Amino acid sequence: MLSRIAKSIVPRYPVAPSSIFTRTMASVAQQQPHANGSAEKKAAAPAPSVTPEQIAIVKATAPVLKEHGVTITSLFYKNMLDAHPELRNIFSMSSQATGRQPRALAASVLAYATYIDDLPKLQHAVERIAHKHVSLTVQPEHYPIVGKYLMEAIGAVLGDAATPEIVDAWTNAYGVLANVFIGLEGSMYKAHEKWTGWRKFKIAKRVKEADNIESFYLAPVDGVPLPTYLPGQYISLQVKVPELGHFQSRQYSLSQAPRKEGDYYRISVKREEGATASDVPGLISNMLHRDLKEGDVVELTHPQGEFFVDPADAAKAGAPLVLISGGVGATPIMSILDTMTQPGVASQRPISWLHASRSKQLQPFAAAVRSIRDANSSRVSSRVFLNSVAEGDVAGTDYDFGGLGMDLSKVDKAKDLFVDNTKAEYYLCGPEQFMIDIRQELENMGVEKERTHLELFATGDIQ
């Protein structure tokens, strides 16, 4: 049934890019029974498996999960974190408070139930989750804990409807998926070589980029040169939160080109104060802005992330690169722009950057982008949208278009968006609805969804 999993996979990994996802999924496929019930030869240590009948049960329960998924995952998180408080160091308590994490898990479980017999359709979700897990140092021993409390929550919420057959089917299905993640994440940890786990970094410098955004230059305390990364990727940053009594970590995009010296990483962080009374203020972002000063120490993990551009990919030379950002979504886009305009980059590509900010004072990297554009005027252009244009803001210098949001009808579809070039790629980062709207506009112009890549600064994924 699942023996075709390894086919039609096009992996996008920064480490062992041609093989990690394919090898992992292929190994799972080889462990599954055929549709006629005959089993392939198994290894000495049996791997998790699921029968065709159990696959049918899992798919049939998808509507139930859609109805009760958040109730199940909310109970799961509560029971698991009560029994294993050490896992609070891994999970975002802010995402727990807002309910986003239970909702994200419910959506993931539903997607798995829907596509359990066609797992390549979940490739992007699996990649995104695996990168996040590795950035948070999730280990194989965590998976049985998650499985135990997830199955218990399903049983508790569904009651008598959770028949032994349904519980067995989901237990086995979870085991197969856990095995995929363990294998995939193990390959990623192995590729990190000498740096796995949390590593101490000193805040070497703080630089204001906008009224609400500061860059933090983070140097390794041990002085060992840092590994490179792919532009668009992020690090996880961990600090102990006194009022919670445990660590919390957040992911922050690296906001400049990798340094050959390997002496520091730069992240650029927005102070999240909460726009409305119902918003949860940014716990770690506010600590960084308010409490942490130059010389203080934080902890980071190895750069991760499936949202990136590979500057060494000579096959993409000449293919236009359209970078679209909103607000602090400029951070991974800045890293891409900075990297792709460095001397000697193999993939020389036309680049167009479109950015939207609420005002000139809230626009990060404005001077740096103008400098890069002017130094590479033959292949780099930029367009800036400001919601609010103030007296003294200069058209053509500080902004190109005024008005609410980003209106793509105002730009040149050929010169700014390259919509007539089927090799053009689009990288979007900003508020979730902003990215969904821009992606839809691009699709309406004929851009296939597969050429549009989105980076979400939140738990879960964009549906």
Image (tube, rainbow, N blue to C red):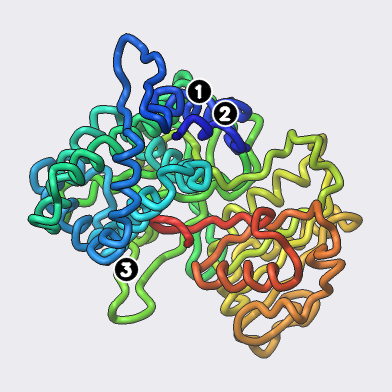
Asked if residue 22 lies left or right of residue 54, the reply is: right
**Which residue is more in the foreground, 434 or 329?**
434
The residue to which callout 3 is attached is 281
- At x 36%, y 28%, the residue is 37
Real-space Cα separation, disc 2 to disc 1, in angstroms: 6 Å
Q: Amino acid at mark 3?
A: Pro
**Which residue is more in the foreground, 95 or 444?**
444
SS of the residue at dot 3? loop
**376, above or below 415, in the image:** above
Q: Amino acid at mark 1?
A: Ala
Mark 2 and mark 1 lie on one chain; the one further toward the N terminus is 2
- At x 84%, y 58%, the residue is 421
- At x 88%, y 58%, the residue is 377
Mark 1 and mark 3 lie on one chain; the one further toward the N terminus is 1
Residue 46: quadrant of the picture:
top left
Which of the two marks, 3 or 2, is nearer to us in this view?
A: 2
Q: Position of residue 302 (x, y in %)?
A: 46, 33
The residue to which callout 1 is attached is 191
- At x 27%, y 43%, the residue is 90
Q: Is residue 410 visible?
A: yes
